Image (cartoon, grey):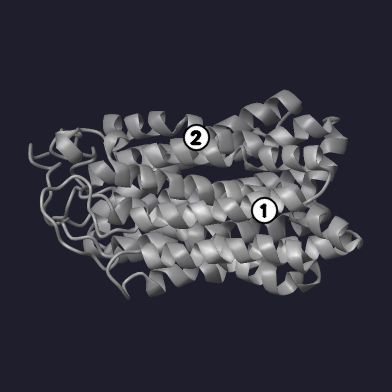
Amino acid sequence: MSKHAGTAGPARPWAASTALLFAAVLLVGLNLRGALAAVSPVLAELRADLGLSPSLAGLVTTVPVFCFAGAAPAAAWWGRRIGAARALLWALLLLAAATVLRVAGGAAVLLIGTVAIGLAMTVGNVLLPAVVKRGFGAGAGQVMGLYTVALAAGAATTAGLTAPVAAATSWRVGLSGWAVLALVAAVVWWLATRRRSETALPTVSGADVAGPGGTATPWRHPVAWAVALVLGLQTFLYYAMTTWLPTVLTEQLATGLGTGAAAATLFQLMGIPGALLVPLLIGRRAGQGWLGLAVAAGWVVLATGLLAWPAGWGLWVTLGGLAQGAGVSLAFTLMVVRAGTDAVARDLSGMSQLVGYGLGAGGPLLVGSLYGAAGGWTAPLLLMAAVGVAYGAFALVAGRAVVIGTESTQPDRGSPTDVGTCQ
């Protein structure tokens, strides 16, 4: 690798076929939430077969989220150590193996396999932005938007197909069968990156990530913090609403579980078109703050609408579902459009996910605790509306036409230039 590989300059393709790399990125995206979403449809059978308590069963879905936060720095380090392409290949192979492992025994094996799945997904979460930044250059913002669509589509696909497969066979087959999708992604990833001679990402120097006053880390850059908090508040709202939305409607409307289940399904499904909106709209104006305000408005309308007129939940949930899909797409897109090099994108991604998922994982607990203390949903829904307002404020900062890690100023329209500002 050239000693100047970490400095700003025209991005070179990672493989002979950019289309193949694009397909590989989307296949990785399909795998980075699917194995988690597959659990809920067969959770009752899984608990009955393994004799799991409700709290232990809850770890099957919450442990990976904590991995997303806690293991993010290690994933960034591993990417520096062996290169993003190789690290992602090993992560996909680990994901395939762990998807089979977790159903091969009892409760202990299930939890070990779940941790391994969380670690593999964390590598993908952290390193994909750096891959996209280097491989697609000026088109990185749009590619990241489509990558987040693949995240939502993978979760929806596994959630929808696991139960029918399990009904025809068993819950173990229903869950383990998704290892095939990870193996397909690994093969395509290897084909897309195998001819790349420079497997390691450039090491990060002070010039790569210089912030105000010449600081040499994204942790000291205010825009980097804004990007991290956008992901954190988005994750807080998403997991809190995903966890409590059915209960809110059941209690606010005094209806059966069917209404809550329908609302939860609509909320998740609307995330797919919501995620598609970001790559379509991100180039319309300089900066992305206006998109952040639109997402914030969707979250605020969802929370206040459920409080003021819960009977109109179809409208509120539709708008909130669009907001959650657009919000996660925007959060990951910001990691690449704010970064001046692939090295900065990797480290900004690691920082954002450590802060973001660490903050977001506490959303359901805080909202649930406030509900228990207040004895109703007024205070929790007002809290979520306030978090939505805070999201909008940080999104305005994160959406400024600023590129971290370079030395001059140029506005962007969703497609980062190789030289930008650090202010």
Q: Position of 125 compared to 304: left or right?
A: left
Residue located at (78% from left, 48% from top): 42
Closest to the observer, 1 or 63: 63
Residue located at (73% from left, 28% from top): 105
Q: Amino acid at mark 1?
A: Leu
In the rendering, at what x and y percent does residue 203 appear? 19, 34
Residue located at (25% from left, 55% from top): 135
Farthest top residue in view:
108
Residue 5 visible, this angle: yes
Q: Amino acid at mark 2?
A: Ala
Residue 32 visible, this angle: no
| Mark seen at residue 69 | 2
Q: Which residue is mark 1?
A: 382
Secondary structure category for the residue under label 2: helix
In the rendering, at what x and y percent does residue 189 appear? 38, 51
Residue 413, picture quadrant: bottom left
In the rendered image, which quarter contains the N terminus?
Answer: top left
In the rendering, at what x and y percent does residue 55 appear? 78, 31
